[in-house]
Amino acid sequence: MKLDRTSFAILAMGAILLIAGPQLPSWMVSMLNVSLCYGTVVLGMMLLMRNGIVSFGHGLYFCLGAYAAGLLDQMLKMPDMLLMVGAAVVVTGVVSAILGLLLAKYRDIFFAMLSLAFSMILYGLLVKTASLGSTDGFNVAAKTVGGFAVAPESQRLMVYSLAVVFATVSAFFLHSYLASHQGRLAGAIKDNELRVEYMGASVMRVVHRNYVISAVLAGIGGALMAVNIGHIDPEMTYWPQSGEFVFVAILSGTGSVFAPLGGALVFEAIRSFAYEYSPNTWQMVLGITMLLVMIFLPGGLWSLFTRKREG
Amino acid sequence: MSQFIAVLVDGIVYSSWLFIIAVGLTLIYGVMKILNIAHGSLYALGAFTSVTLCGLWFNAGLPPMGSYLMLLLSAILVGLVAGPVIERGLLRFMYGKDEVVLVLVTYALFLILEDLIKLIWGVDPLFITGPGGESPYSLLGNFEVAGLTYPNYNLVLIAVAVATGGALAWALAKTRSGKLLLAVIHDREVSAALGINVGRIYFVTFTIGAMLAGVGGALTAPTVSVVTGMGAEVIVLAFAVVVIGGLGSLPGAALGALIVGLVRAAAVHYLPEVELFSIYFVMAVVLILRPKGLFSGAEVRKI
């Protein structure tokens, strides 16, 4: 694995966020924390979009990751943050490997619809499962990290640091993957699948692998979100949640792994401020932003940077 | 036995309701290739408008029977106002873009309309009831099947669904505009080259589609509490219906509505835990076995 400028920049970003954590005001820590969870999910969305695929059901893995984390606490009484993320990775990995076999053949609107159907199936199951709190969900609390107990007063900072670490590691590996031979096939598939097949690569296999990676990233994001918020409910797999991920991915653009992380922060900032100043119109603000980005910046916010560099 | 009949009656009523909502969605997709998420908001707009108009009607002390006119008027109003504004103001600039991009445009529109509704009508649940407690839902009396009582309003739903489906099928097959529409569906560019005003066809189609969403909302309003977020709930159901039947297919929407309606009614009566699950399970199974839906013909060659 060769390290380029971006890899170092990712590691530097992670280090800065970790060091700055204790000094930042608490509202900023919360905002960064949520953005990092979202950003991790959207990293996966970006990977799919590089293949020319948009999932309208990634809430499925976001929710599965969160429930995997929650059940570890609830049923197995193992409220360890690292184990929770590990459980999320295993569960989302297995489920996406199976569903991916079906989905990898689908494109465009049919991919969007089938992924939507899968996420709504989980929603339908969860809202009727009384033992998991139905529509109310249940609370999740993480008390240890890798076996070491965390003092309640440093809990928030610990959750934040963990989000920084996982988002950084995810972005780091995704960047290396995208730069690798296999990763570069994504763009080729978007351009022309037939050509990729003729050149000897299996489109199915690449799409399947990318789907599983993106699902696992969504699962990590979901588990981090569960311990961050401390509560999970079926809304995490309801379609507007999946729509929000697509929204952030469109807003960010697919130019670099920094785009989803930055885009998630911009999204969270817009949402917090719009919610603060006009609680009844924050969705409208989001919708108008989305339209403006799609019309004037089809490459997302990231294209602002690349354009400058080229010019 | 009586439970089986109850499933049938509930299923057919629910199917009719689903069809009224889904038919506009499938019409717009069939002609314009836009899978319109904002259809859910137009549905909600229809419901909220009818609450206001019926409220005005009841408050003016006019005969309660006229409230049905107000329901109809609400649907027409939504179609004639929201339809043209959205099509001319936004969608017209998006034609020719990727289908997925168009879905996202309508998703943005959905977010905007959801808040617009909150701004106009507030966030409290609303009901259609007159000063004496009259509601279009109960005005017509009841009917009995196998010992179970149903409001006659359900028959109105069935009648409207059958009439809408019949009228659309007739218009597509028998009228000149319908034939022009089919030509545009088949090949937009050749139709334009032959002198069909494609822009106008799109405009009219979207207006009719919006009106149908409004009809769905207006007819639903008397039966439920009208709340924000009702559009989000309905639009995925409508997606399930049109995807099962085949996107853009009129008989497909009817079949999809029947399947979803009966499956849900059976689930509600026999196994309430799987009510929502069953609908999306059917949707997933159909997509897996027949990705283009049950009513998809052979793909027309484009090259």
Image: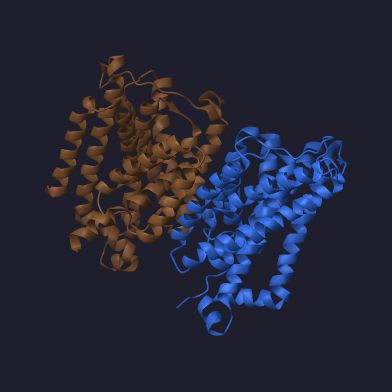
Chain colours: A brown, B blue
User: Is B111 positioned to the left or the right of A260 in the image?
Assistant: right
For the point 55% across and 38% down, the residue is: A124
For the point 81% across and 48% down, the residue is: B67
The residue at the far bottom in this view is B194
Residue A80: image quadrant is top left
Residue A184: image quadrant is bottom left
The residue at the far front in this view is B60
For the point 83% across and 38% down, the residue is: B134
Question: Which quarter of the image is occupied by the C terminus of chain B?
Answer: bottom left
Tally of numbered discs: 0
Relative to A222, does residue A213 appear above or below in the rendering? below
Relative to B195, does residue A71 appear above or below in the rendering? above
Relative to B298, does residue B191 appear above or below in the rendering? below
| Nearer to us in this view, B236 or A258 | A258
* Viewer can see residue A180: yes
Question: Which quarter of the image is occupied by the N terminus of chain B?
Answer: top right
In the rendered image, residue B188, in percent from the top left (x then y), is placed at 53, 76
In the rendered image, residue A145, in percent from the top left (x then y), is placed at 27, 21
In the rendered image, residue B252, in percent from the top left (x then y), is placed at 64, 60
Relative to B61, does residue B243 appear above or below in the rendering? below
| Nearer to us in this view, A239 or B226 | B226
In the rendered image, residue A214, in percent from the top left (x then y), is placed at 34, 45
* Viewer can see residue A75: no
User: Is A218 positioned to the left or the right of A13 in the image?
Assistant: right
